[in-house]
Amino acid sequence: MSRVGRRFRTLPIRARLSMLVAAAVAFAVAAVSVTCWFIVQGKLYDQVDNQLDSAVFRLNEGQVTALLAACPKNVTEQTDAMRPRDYFVQVVKADGTVCVFTDSVGVMKATARDKSMATDPDLSLRIFHNSTDNVGKDVRVRTTPVVLGFGPNVEIYPDVALMVGVSLKETQKTLNELALVLLLVSGIGVVGAGAAGLAVARAGLRPVDKLTEAVEHVARTEDLSIRIPVEQESDDEIARLSRSFNSMTSSLANSRELQQQLIADAGHELRTPLTSLRTNIELLTRSEETGRPIPEADRKALLASVKAQMTELAALIGDLQELSRSEGQRGERVQVVALEDTVESALRRARLRGPELTITADIQPWFVRGEPSALERAVVNILDNAVKFSPESGTIEVQLSGGVLTVRDHGPGIPAEEIPHVFDRFWRSPSARALPGSGLGLSIVARTVQQAGGEVTLARAQGGGTVATVRLPGAPVPPPETV
C-alpha cells in the first residue's frame, strides 16, 4: 500500500466519507463538463463549416479563373460584391505553390492533406480541418477541387485545390469562456459536495459516536447497564448495530450476574463440607499431638466422615467444572450418538448404586446429535435422582421410545410448589438436604438437554413418585463402519 493510501486509512471516517463524496462528484462533474465542452465544440465547428460552404458558393468562376491565370501572382482587381471579406481564400497547386486573393485576410499554411486534394481531385470530396495562418493563429479550412462550369459541363481544374478559411478566434473565445464557466461550476459543485458529504457523514455517524461513547464507558467503568436508544421503526445498519450492542451488554450483564451467583452458591456449598472436614482433621491432629488416642470406633467414624466429605467435594468440583465449560469446548465433541447405548451404560451404573432396587427398561433405538459423555452424565444424574429417592426394594421404570426417555420412581414425589425450582443451580428440596449431593445434578441435565435441542421436565406421577421426561430430536443414522 502506498504512503497516500496508508495516510488516507488513518483519517477519521467523516473525512474519508467527505473526500470520497467530493471525489465521486468531481469525477461526475468532470465527465459531464468535458462531454458538454466537446459537444459545444462540435456544434460550433459545424456552424463554421456551414459558413465556409456559403463563402465558397459566393466565389464565382471568374474570380477563381483570374486567380489561377495570375498565379503565382495575387489577383488585384475584383468587384466589391465578390470580395470574400473576413475570409482566407487561396489556391494550392500540387507542387505546393500557393496563390492568394488580394482581399484575403491572410495566407494559410497548406498541409499535406490540401496538397493531396490538388494531386488527386475528387468532385464529391471536400476536406475540413484546422490549420494556421502566416502569423500562427488558428484557422478553420475547407479544401475542395476547383470546379469550372455548371450542370453537365462541370469540369475539375487539374492539379489545383481551392482553400477557403475563417479565423477560429471567436470560436475559441466562446469555447474558452465555456471552459471557464464549467470549471467554476465544477469547483463550486465539488466544494458543495464535500461540505454536504461532511454534513451527511456527521449526521449519519452520530449514532456511531453514541455507540463509541457507550463502549468507552463500559471499558472504563465496567457498567453493563448502559443502553443506546434506538428508534423502534428504524431498521438500518446503525439501528441494527445499536440493537446488537444492547443485546450484547444485556447478555454480558446476565452472564456476570449468573457468574456471581454461581460463585456465591459454590462458596456456600463448599463451606459446609470444608468445615466438617477441617473439624474432623483437627480432632485427629489434636489426638496425635496430645497423645490421647481416640477410641477405635470413633477413629473409624471420623475417617469415614473425612472420606465422605472428600468424595462430596470431588463431586461438587466436577459439577462446577461441567457448568463452567464453554460452548466452543462442547462443539468440538458433538456427534451423532446412539441414545439407546447411552441409556444402557447409565443403567449399568445405576444398578451398581442401587443393587436392592428393581430397574426395568424398555429401550428402543434412537439417534441424537450431542456430546456422548455429557448425554451419559445427564442420564446418570436422572437415574441417580430416582435411586436416591426410591424406597428400599422399590422399582424404577425406564422407557425410551421415539426420542422420549421417561424415568419413573415410586418415592415420595416432589411437592407441586417445588417443581419450578428443581432445575435451579444448588437448589435442594428441604426434605433432601440431609442426603448427599450438591444440587447441581438436575441443572446439568437441563443444560445438556437444551444444548442437544431437547427439553426435560419433572412431574408428580400418578399413584406416587416422580417421572422425569426427556425429549430429544432425532439425527440421521450414521453409516455403518467398514473394516
Image: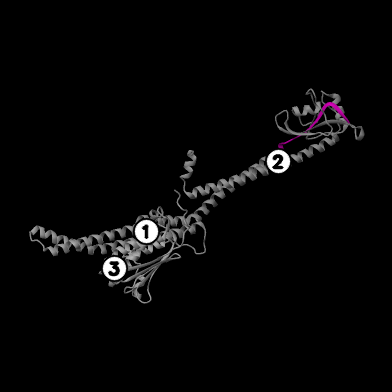
Residue 142 at x, y percent in the picture: 78, 34
Asked whether disc 2 touches disc 3, contact meaning CB atoms under 8 Å apart, the reply is no
| Residue picked out by circle 2 | 41
| Residue picked out by circle 3 | 356
Magenta residues (range): 155-174
Q: Name the residue type under label 2.
A: Gln
Residue 114 drawn above or below residue 208? above
SS for callout 3: loop
| Residue picked out by circle 1 | 374
Q: Name the residue type under label 3.
A: Glu
Residue 230 drawn above or below residue 199? below
Q: CA distance from mark 2 to mark 3?
A: 108 Å
Asked whether disc 1 touches disc 2, contact meaning CB atoms under 8 Å apart, the reply is no
Asked whether disc 1 touches disc 3, contact meaning CB atoms under 8 Å apart, the reply is no
Looking at the image, which is closer to me, 328 or 258?
328
Specify whether residue 143 is painted magenta. Answer: no
Q: Main secondary structure of the magenta part?
A: strand
Determine the residue positioned at 47% across, 41% down: 6
Q: Is residue 181 visible?
A: no
